[in-house]
Amino acid sequence: KDVAGNEKKDQTSKFTVKDRTKTTIAMVPGWNLISIPAALVDGAIDTVITNTQVETVLTYDPATPGGWLTAVRDGDSLVGTLDTIDESHAYWIFQKNGDDIKVDLPGYKGGASATPPAISIVEGWNLIPVVSLTIGESSVATTVDADLYLWGIDWVKAKGWNASGEVWTEVTPDTAAAVNLTTGATFSVGSGYWLYANAAGVIVP
Protein backbone atom coordinates (compact mmCIF):
# COMPACT_ATOMS: atom_id res chain seq x y z
CA LYS A 1 0.00 0.00 0.00
CA ASP A 2 1.51 3.32 -1.01
CA VAL A 3 1.14 6.74 0.55
CA ALA A 4 -1.74 7.58 -1.80
CA GLY A 5 -3.72 4.61 -0.53
CA ASN A 6 -3.26 2.38 -3.59
CA GLU A 7 -3.14 -1.20 -2.41
CA LYS A 8 -1.85 -4.25 -4.26
CA LYS A 9 -3.65 -7.47 -3.62
CA ASP A 10 -2.36 -10.95 -4.47
CA GLN A 11 -3.73 -12.45 -7.67
CA THR A 12 -3.72 -15.97 -9.05
CA SER A 13 -4.17 -17.29 -12.56
CA LYS A 14 -4.24 -20.71 -14.16
CA PHE A 15 -2.68 -21.86 -17.41
CA THR A 16 -2.43 -25.18 -19.21
CA VAL A 17 0.71 -26.48 -20.90
CA LYS A 18 -0.15 -28.73 -23.85
CA ASP A 19 2.24 -31.01 -25.67
CA ARG A 20 3.02 -30.05 -29.26
CA THR A 21 0.95 -32.10 -31.71
CA LYS A 22 3.02 -34.94 -33.09
CA THR A 23 3.35 -35.66 -36.80
CA THR A 24 1.82 -38.97 -37.89
CA ILE A 25 3.40 -41.20 -40.54
CA ALA A 26 0.92 -43.78 -41.80
CA MET A 27 2.09 -47.40 -41.65
CA VAL A 28 0.66 -50.78 -42.69
CA PRO A 29 1.63 -54.37 -41.84
CA GLY A 30 4.61 -55.49 -43.91
CA TRP A 31 7.24 -53.36 -45.61
CA ASN A 32 6.87 -49.56 -45.56
CA LEU A 33 9.16 -47.04 -47.32
CA ILE A 34 9.02 -43.83 -45.30
CA SER A 35 10.98 -40.72 -44.40
CA ILE A 36 10.90 -38.20 -41.56
CA PRO A 37 9.68 -34.90 -43.07
CA ALA A 38 11.63 -32.57 -40.74
CA ALA A 39 14.34 -32.57 -38.08
CA LEU A 40 13.51 -34.64 -35.00
CA VAL A 41 13.72 -33.44 -31.42
CA ASP A 42 15.29 -36.82 -30.51
CA GLY A 43 16.53 -39.11 -33.28
CA ALA A 44 17.42 -42.19 -31.21
CA ILE A 45 15.89 -45.14 -33.06
CA ASP A 46 14.03 -46.51 -30.01
CA THR A 47 12.63 -43.02 -29.30
CA VAL A 48 11.31 -42.62 -32.85
CA ILE A 49 10.09 -46.19 -33.28
CA THR A 50 8.20 -47.24 -30.16
CA ASN A 51 6.07 -49.93 -31.82
CA THR A 52 7.40 -53.28 -30.56
CA GLN A 53 5.91 -54.96 -33.66
CA VAL A 54 8.60 -53.30 -35.81
CA GLU A 55 11.08 -56.07 -36.59
CA THR A 56 13.52 -54.48 -39.07
CA VAL A 57 14.62 -50.99 -40.09
CA LEU A 58 16.95 -50.43 -43.06
CA THR A 59 18.42 -47.43 -44.82
CA TYR A 60 20.76 -47.09 -47.77
CA ASP A 61 23.66 -44.65 -47.51
CA PRO A 62 26.19 -44.71 -50.38
CA ALA A 63 28.74 -43.00 -48.12
CA THR A 64 28.73 -46.05 -45.83
CA PRO A 65 30.90 -49.09 -46.70
CA GLY A 66 28.49 -51.69 -48.10
CA GLY A 67 25.74 -49.07 -48.41
CA TRP A 68 23.22 -50.54 -45.98
CA LEU A 69 22.60 -49.74 -42.31
CA THR A 70 20.35 -52.13 -40.39
CA ALA A 71 18.56 -52.44 -37.05
CA VAL A 72 16.65 -55.57 -35.98
CA ARG A 73 14.39 -56.33 -33.02
CA ASP A 74 16.11 -57.66 -29.91
CA GLY A 75 13.58 -57.70 -27.09
CA ASP A 76 12.49 -54.15 -26.32
CA SER A 77 15.18 -52.55 -28.50
CA LEU A 78 16.28 -52.25 -32.11
CA VAL A 79 19.98 -53.04 -32.43
CA GLY A 80 22.51 -53.03 -35.24
CA THR A 81 24.51 -50.60 -37.37
CA LEU A 82 21.56 -48.18 -37.55
CA ASP A 83 20.98 -46.42 -34.22
CA THR A 84 19.54 -43.03 -35.20
CA ILE A 85 16.79 -41.77 -37.50
CA ASP A 86 17.07 -38.41 -39.30
CA GLU A 87 15.48 -36.33 -42.03
CA SER A 88 18.31 -36.91 -44.52
CA HIS A 89 17.54 -40.58 -45.19
CA ALA A 90 14.59 -42.75 -46.19
CA TYR A 91 13.86 -46.00 -44.36
CA TRP A 92 12.48 -49.43 -45.11
CA ILE A 93 10.51 -50.58 -42.06
CA PHE A 94 8.99 -54.03 -41.60
CA GLN A 95 6.30 -54.38 -38.94
CA LYS A 96 3.64 -56.93 -38.02
CA ASN A 97 0.80 -54.50 -37.31
CA GLY A 98 -0.53 -51.24 -38.74
CA ASP A 99 0.36 -48.86 -35.90
CA ASP A 100 1.42 -45.44 -37.21
CA ILE A 101 4.65 -43.69 -36.29
CA LYS A 102 4.15 -40.47 -34.33
CA VAL A 103 7.12 -38.14 -34.00
CA ASP A 104 7.86 -34.76 -32.45
CA LEU A 105 8.84 -32.38 -35.26
CA PRO A 106 9.16 -28.71 -34.32
CA GLY A 107 9.53 -27.72 -37.97
CA TYR A 108 11.71 -24.96 -39.41
CA LYS A 109 11.11 -21.49 -37.99
CA GLY A 110 12.45 -18.12 -39.08
CA GLY A 111 15.33 -17.04 -36.86
CA ALA A 112 15.88 -20.53 -35.47
CA SER A 113 19.41 -21.87 -35.18
CA ALA A 114 18.74 -24.97 -37.35
CA THR A 115 19.55 -24.62 -41.05
CA PRO A 116 17.29 -26.09 -43.77
CA PRO A 117 18.28 -29.58 -44.92
CA ALA A 118 20.62 -30.39 -47.79
CA ILE A 119 20.69 -33.99 -49.02
CA SER A 120 23.72 -35.26 -50.94
CA ILE A 121 23.08 -37.34 -54.07
CA VAL A 122 25.54 -39.69 -55.76
CA GLU A 123 25.61 -40.90 -59.34
CA GLY A 124 23.42 -44.00 -59.57
CA TRP A 125 20.82 -45.16 -57.07
CA ASN A 126 19.93 -43.13 -53.98
CA LEU A 127 17.29 -43.74 -51.29
CA ILE A 128 15.90 -40.26 -50.69
CA PRO A 129 13.48 -38.73 -48.17
CA VAL A 130 10.81 -36.14 -48.95
CA VAL A 131 11.30 -33.25 -46.52
CA SER A 132 8.96 -30.28 -46.11
CA LEU A 133 9.71 -26.84 -44.67
CA THR A 134 6.00 -26.40 -43.86
CA ILE A 135 6.02 -28.94 -41.00
CA GLY A 136 4.94 -27.16 -37.83
CA GLU A 137 2.96 -24.49 -39.71
CA SER A 138 -0.82 -24.13 -39.84
CA SER A 139 -0.86 -25.25 -43.48
CA VAL A 140 1.23 -28.35 -44.13
CA ALA A 141 2.03 -29.53 -47.66
CA THR A 142 1.41 -33.25 -48.23
CA THR A 143 2.96 -33.38 -51.71
CA VAL A 144 5.66 -31.51 -53.59
CA ASP A 145 6.31 -31.23 -57.32
CA ALA A 146 9.05 -33.72 -58.21
CA ASP A 147 10.92 -31.38 -60.57
CA LEU A 148 10.87 -28.59 -57.99
CA TYR A 149 12.06 -30.90 -55.20
CA LEU A 150 14.90 -32.21 -57.40
CA TRP A 151 15.77 -28.84 -58.92
CA GLY A 152 19.36 -28.95 -60.19
CA ILE A 153 19.54 -32.77 -60.07
CA ASP A 154 20.10 -34.68 -63.33
CA TRP A 155 17.70 -37.55 -62.65
CA VAL A 156 16.20 -40.32 -64.74
CA LYS A 157 13.45 -41.85 -62.61
CA ALA A 158 12.25 -42.28 -59.05
CA LYS A 159 10.47 -45.35 -57.69
CA GLY A 160 8.12 -45.27 -54.72
CA TRP A 161 6.50 -48.14 -52.81
CA ASN A 162 2.77 -48.40 -52.25
CA ALA A 163 2.71 -50.38 -49.02
CA SER A 164 -1.06 -50.98 -49.01
CA GLY A 165 -1.08 -52.43 -52.52
CA GLU A 166 2.48 -53.80 -52.33
CA VAL A 167 3.29 -52.33 -55.73
CA TRP A 168 5.95 -50.00 -57.08
CA THR A 169 5.05 -46.54 -58.34
CA GLU A 170 7.08 -44.49 -60.81
CA VAL A 171 7.85 -40.78 -60.95
CA THR A 172 9.58 -39.32 -64.00
CA PRO A 173 10.75 -35.77 -64.73
CA ASP A 174 8.77 -33.52 -67.00
CA THR A 175 10.16 -33.24 -70.51
CA ALA A 176 12.75 -30.50 -70.97
CA ALA A 177 10.35 -28.49 -73.10
CA ALA A 178 7.46 -28.71 -70.67
CA VAL A 179 8.75 -28.50 -67.11
CA ASN A 180 5.84 -27.43 -64.93
CA LEU A 181 6.52 -26.83 -61.23
CA THR A 182 2.86 -26.81 -60.24
CA THR A 183 1.06 -29.54 -62.18
CA GLY A 184 3.72 -32.19 -62.88
CA ALA A 185 4.43 -35.47 -61.09
CA THR A 186 4.65 -35.22 -57.31
CA PHE A 187 6.37 -36.82 -54.32
CA SER A 188 4.46 -37.54 -51.10
CA VAL A 189 5.89 -35.84 -47.99
CA GLY A 190 6.93 -38.48 -45.46
CA SER A 191 7.52 -41.16 -48.11
CA GLY A 192 10.82 -42.49 -49.38
CA TYR A 193 11.92 -43.04 -52.98
CA TRP A 194 14.64 -44.80 -54.90
CA LEU A 195 16.14 -42.16 -57.19
CA TYR A 196 18.47 -42.80 -60.10
CA ALA A 197 20.71 -39.81 -60.87
CA ASN A 198 23.09 -39.33 -63.79
CA ALA A 199 25.46 -37.26 -61.68
CA ALA A 200 26.17 -36.30 -58.09
CA GLY A 201 24.35 -33.29 -56.68
CA VAL A 202 22.52 -31.84 -53.68
CA ILE A 203 18.78 -31.76 -53.00
CA VAL A 204 17.73 -28.53 -51.26
CA PRO A 205 14.03 -28.94 -50.38
Image (cartoon, helix red, strand yellow):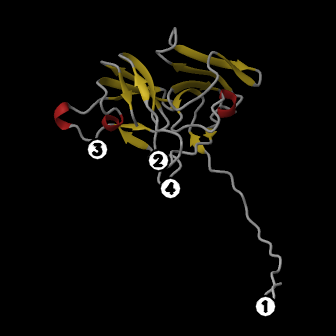
Q: Are marks 4 and 3 in contact (CB under 8 Å)?
A: no
- Residue 146: image tag: none
Q: Are marks 4 and 2 in contact (CB under 8 Å)?
A: no
| Quadrant assignment for the C terminus | top left
Nearer mark to the viewer, of 2 and 3: 2
Q: Amino acid at mark 1?
A: Ala
Pointer 2 local density, CA inside 10 Å: few below 14, some 14–19, many at least 20 = some
Q: Residue furthest front?
A: 3
Nearer mark to the viewer, of 1 and 3: 1
Q: In this view of the protein, can residue 168 be seen by the observer? A: no
Q: Are marks 2 and 3 in contact (CB under 8 Å)?
A: no
Q: Nearer the N terminus, badge 2 or badge 3?
A: 2
Task: Determine which residue is flagged by label 4.
Answer: 138
Task: Determine which residue is flagged by label 2.
Answer: 134
Q: Is residue 5 above or below residue 198?
A: below
Q: Nearer the N terminus, badge 1 or badge 3?
A: 1
The secondary element bearing badge 2 is classed as loop
Q: Amino acid at mark 2?
A: Thr
Q: Position of residue 178 (x, y in %)?
A: 19, 37
Q: Nearer the N terminus, badge 4 or badge 1?
A: 1
Q: Are marks 1 and 3 in contact (CB under 8 Å)?
A: no
Rounded to the nearest whole Å, what is the CA distance between mark 4 and mark 2?
A: 8 Å
Task: Determine which residue is flagged by label 3.
Answer: 183
Q: Amino acid at mark 4?
A: Ser
| Quadrant assignment for the N terminus | bottom right
The secondary element bearing badge 3 is classed as loop
- The residue drawn where x is 49% and y is 18% is 61
Task: Determine which residue is flagged by label 1.
Answer: 4
Q: Nearer the N terminus, badge 4 or badge 3?
A: 4
Pointer 3 local density, CA inside 10 Å: few below 14, some 14–19, many at least 20 = few
Q: Position of residue 141 (x, y in %)?
A: 44, 47
Q: Amino acid at mark 3?
A: Thr
